[in-house]
Image (cartoon, rainbow, N blue to C red):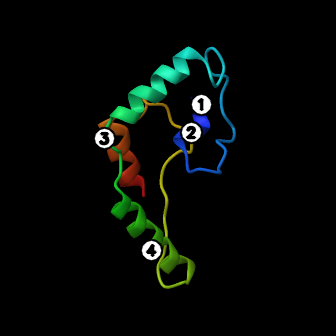
């Protein structure tokens, strides 16, 4: 069990942090096993819809605006901070 097993076969998880015990360590294995038992954060249909909408923007038929940091912490993702970001956008 390793981090790459969470992703699409054939793809490698790049830019990984130093995981406790290494990427194949007991803590990572336990976390991966826990995540595998949880429901998905998004569903396949939502991903397909997003791909279609991005493709429309790529064709110049729509405007794409992405808001957010690329690496915000879970602690920083509060309702107030999300609301304020939306107000800014």
Which residue position is annotated with label 3? 39
Q: Position of residue 46 (x, y in %)?
A: 35, 61
Which residue position is annotated with label 1? 2
Q: Quadrant of the C terminus?
A: bottom left
Instruction: Report which quarter residue 40 is drawn in.
Output: top left
Q: Which mark is residue 5?
A: 2
Instruction: Report which quarter residue 70 is drawn in.
Output: top right
Q: Image point 44% across, 74% down: which residue?
A: 52
**Is residue 26 found left or right of 62 in the rendered image?**
right
Q: CA distance from mark 4 to mark 1?
A: 31 Å
Secondary structure beneath dot 3 equals: loop
Q: CA distance from mark 3 to mark 1?
A: 20 Å
Q: Earlier in the sequence, mark 3 or mark 2?
A: 2
**Is residue 88 found left or right of 3 in the rendered image?**
left
Q: Quadrant of the N terminus?
A: top right
Q: Position of residue 31 (x, y in %)?
A: 46, 24
Q: Earlier in the sequence, mark 3 or mark 1?
A: 1
Q: Earlier in the sequence, mark 4 or mark 3?
A: 3
Q: Position of residue 69 (x, y in %)?
A: 53, 45
Secondary structure beneath dot 1 equals: loop
- Badge nearest the viewer, 3 or 1: 1
Q: Which mark is residue 17?
A: none
> Disc 1, disc 2: CB below 8 Å?
yes
Q: CA distance from mark 3 to mark 2?
A: 17 Å
Q: CA distance from mark 1 to mark 2?
A: 6 Å
> Disc 4, disc 1: CB below 8 Å?
no
Q: Earlier in the sequence, mark 4 or mark 1?
A: 1
Q: Image point 59% across, 30% down: which residue?
A: 2
Q: CA distance from mark 2 to mark 4?
A: 26 Å
Compared to residue 5, the image places residue 43 above or below, namely: below
Secondary structure beneath dot 2 equals: helix
Which residue position is annotated with label 4? 52
């Amino acid at each position: 069990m390793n981090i790459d097993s969470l992703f699409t076969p054939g793809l490698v998880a790049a830019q990984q942090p130093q995981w406790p015990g290494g990427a194949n360590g007991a803590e990572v294995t336990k976390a991966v096993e826990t995540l595998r038992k949880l429901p998905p954060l998004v569903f396949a249909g939502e991903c397909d819809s997003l791909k279609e909408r991005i493709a429309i923007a790529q064709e110049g038929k729509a405007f794409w605006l992405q808001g957010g940091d690329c690496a915000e912490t879970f602690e920083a993702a509060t309702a107030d901070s999300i609301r304020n970001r939306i107000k800014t956008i």
